[in-house]
Image: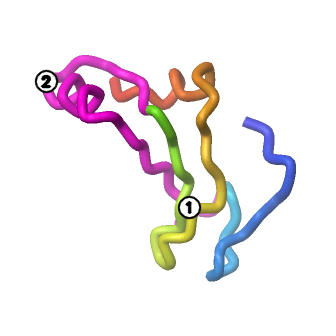
Amino acid sequence: MVLENNKSCKCGYKMGDPWIVPNSVYTFFGWLIVSIGISHPPVRVNFQCEKCRETIYTITDKNELRSHAYH
């Protein structure tokens, strides 16, 4: 994952800081599959600050999303 800009949240945290965490977004079918224990890639991954909840980066590329599949 290569970032074009080094955007920070309102708190001042950037990618790589411990407060920036990935949050996977699944379809209903995706959640159903994951809930029974089968690996499935999300439709989007938002990297958000845990303090202010601002999203600073989003992944929607299918190849990159495969690396964020629940195992």
In the image, residue 46 sits, relative to residue 49, either above or below, namely above
Image coords of residue 20 (percent x, y):
56, 61
Identify the residue at horizontal 72%, vertical 36% (top origin): 1
User: Residue 3 location in percent, x, y?
Assistant: 80, 46
Q: Amino acid at mark 1?
A: Ile
Instruction: List x then y, in percent, for residue 15.
Output: 68, 57
Task: Residue 36: give its label.
Answer: 2
For marks 2 and 1, give the CA distance. Answer: 28 Å
Residue 5: x, y in percent? Answer: 85, 56
Earlier sequence position, callout 2 versus callout 1 = 1
User: Which numbered tag is attached to residue 20?
Assistant: 1
Relative horizontal placement of residue 63, taking residue 38 as reference (left or right)? right
What is the span of residues highlighted in magenta in the rendered image?
Answer: 16-42
Left or right of 27 in this view: 69: right
Q: Which mark identifies residue 71?
A: none
Q: Residue 12, can we see it? A: yes
**Front-lying residue, 17 or 45:** 45
Number of other residues with Cα within 10 Å of mark 2, as a class: few under 14, some 14 to 19, many 20 or more: few
The residue at the far right in this view is: 4
